[in-house]
Amino acid sequence: MSRFLLVFFLLLSQSVLAAQTTIRLSGLSGELQDNVQLYLNRYSADEISTSLRFQSRLEQDINSALQALGYYHSEITIELQPRNNGSRLLIHVDVGEATRIANIDIQINGEAATDAEFNALLKQAPQQGQILHHGRYDSFKSSLNSLALRRGYFDANFTLARLEVAPSVKQAFIKLHFDSGPRYRFGEVSFQGEHIQSARLQSLVPFQAGDPYLATQLGELNQALANTNWFSSILVTGNTEQLSEHILPVEVELAPRKRNSIETGIGFSDDVGARFKLNWLKPWLNDRGHSLDTKLALSSAEQSVEAAYKMPLETVATDFWQLQYGLRNRDYQDTRSKESNLALERHWLLQNAWYRTASIRWLYEDYTQADQEDTSSLIMPGISFSRSRQTGSGMPIRADRLLFGVEVSDRSWGSDESFVRLRGRAGYITTLADNHRVIGRLDAGAILMEEVDNLPPSIRFFAGGDNNLRGYAYESVSPLNNEGELIGGRYMATASLEYQYRVTGNWWLATFADYGSAWSNTPDWKRGVGVGVRWGSPIGAVRIDFAWGLDAEGSPFQLHFSLGPEL
């Protein structure tokens, strides 16, 4: 009996499959075909049948899809074609003549009548003579409402919104009368839950009381507050319950960030082995917003610790002082040094989004470089300009970074040596068609003096390692003395070009080429190539590189593993 039932159900399922009906569409292309297909895709395989009732439903849906795009005189024929495994409904469509806009009457009334943004939006309105497109008509209406909300016309409404279609004469008539009413203005900004002085928070507000409302400026305020690192949560809202004479007060609810934040990082390369980084941040120490950032970096070649005390000024987002002190010990290749750095910096954020930093730095270094042993004490005032921008986090879609700096040392103010040190960096990231990323980097420096023999290793230039020439050991590219030992150079220039392809999700394959040198008289250019794997983790890009130095003896292989920003 059970065998009989099994055979019965198998035959039944085959008969159901044999009776399956499919749909094939012809006569359309482009947007017309896409819109009709959207309607047809709503049918499941079980709903499709050869019945006249279903064919009538098909015809109604196709007409609806075409009328939405301005075609009211379509001819639809449906032919039933028997097939070996069922049947097919062959649908042929002749769209006929389109219905066009014969007359359009759009009026902007109220204060928005003189608003340049609304005048610009009117250029995107449907035009007389165009084929009627219901979607674009609805989209334009939505754009008017959205723009009004973004620019503070909270009482705006359509006093007349009518779309009339006369299919018999193939004409459409649009009437849109939009009354914006008055434009609201910003009121006072109040902060709740703050642990930082109100005057410092007020300096972050990008508008004045009485300025015309603009939603983007609320976003700018939110971002400025977030950039301080003082808060764990930020909520910026307009207080609609306190409206008076079209003035909108702004309320900001804040919650303080934890007083201690710890971040870690790891890395690995063949030449220096494992690297470990620990950052301990105290984002706020008092009601003036002072902060302390401590960094520890450990590897077999180099160990360092650095502390930076940041003191924001009255204009918190753009001006601050920073006092830094750091110790570093290096014992690698032909360099052995112990250095102490003390620096006082003044930072300004300029109107063009560049940071200007003026500094004075004292460096004391006890070192052995190749066959030279010495100590050096240098006092170096300097100035630098930097800018960083990016879209997206982790592995950004687009990003660029620029840095130009100069430091000066002179015996007249107590330094052991006189020189000018120039440094510049540039980096760029772009993403093409979602799955292709290109990264370019340039790094260069120069010391303006005749010889660098009396300068400590931290001032001289070396190349090589995971930051530039990846096919060469860390700081192994440099001029040599008569014994073949590294002595560092007056100049350095490196360039890198990298291409990444997304394999799946946040996983990417990379290939790259590096080029550069560090020299004092004549550059000995080095080339390197390699491949790598990238993972866009929630805390940053994880990178594994396999690199070869084409001009190194025996073209040695270098392995690098790192976590952190790509620029």
Image (tube, rainbow, N blue to C red):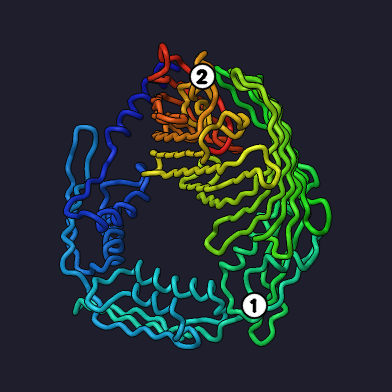
Q: Quadrant of residue 531 in the image?
A: top left
Pick the front one: 394 or 206: 206
Say which of marks 2 and 1 sits in front. Answer: 2
Q: Tell me if I can see residue 55 in this picture.
A: yes
Tell me the residue at 30%/82% (across/down).
104
Residue 237, x across and y down, in percent:
67, 68
Instruction: State the residue position of label 2.
Output: 481
> Is residue 305 at all visible to an observer of this figure?
no
Residue for point 68% across, 76% down: 240
Cα distance, mark 2 to mark 1? 68 Å
Q: Is residue 65 above or below residue 9?
A: below
Question: Of marks 2 and 1, which one's residue comes earlier in the chain?
Answer: 1
- Where disc 2 sits, the SS reads loop
Amino acid bearing label 2: Asn
- Give, as a three-letter code, the residue at label 1: Phe
Q: Residue at x 61, y 29 (%)?
A: 457
Label number found at residue 239: none
Q: Which residue is more in the foreground, 334 or 284? A: 334
Q: In the picture shown, does residue 177 fall above or below 196?
A: below
Are discs 2 and 1 less than 8 Å apart at CB?
A: no
Give percent across and percent down for residue 407.
59, 45
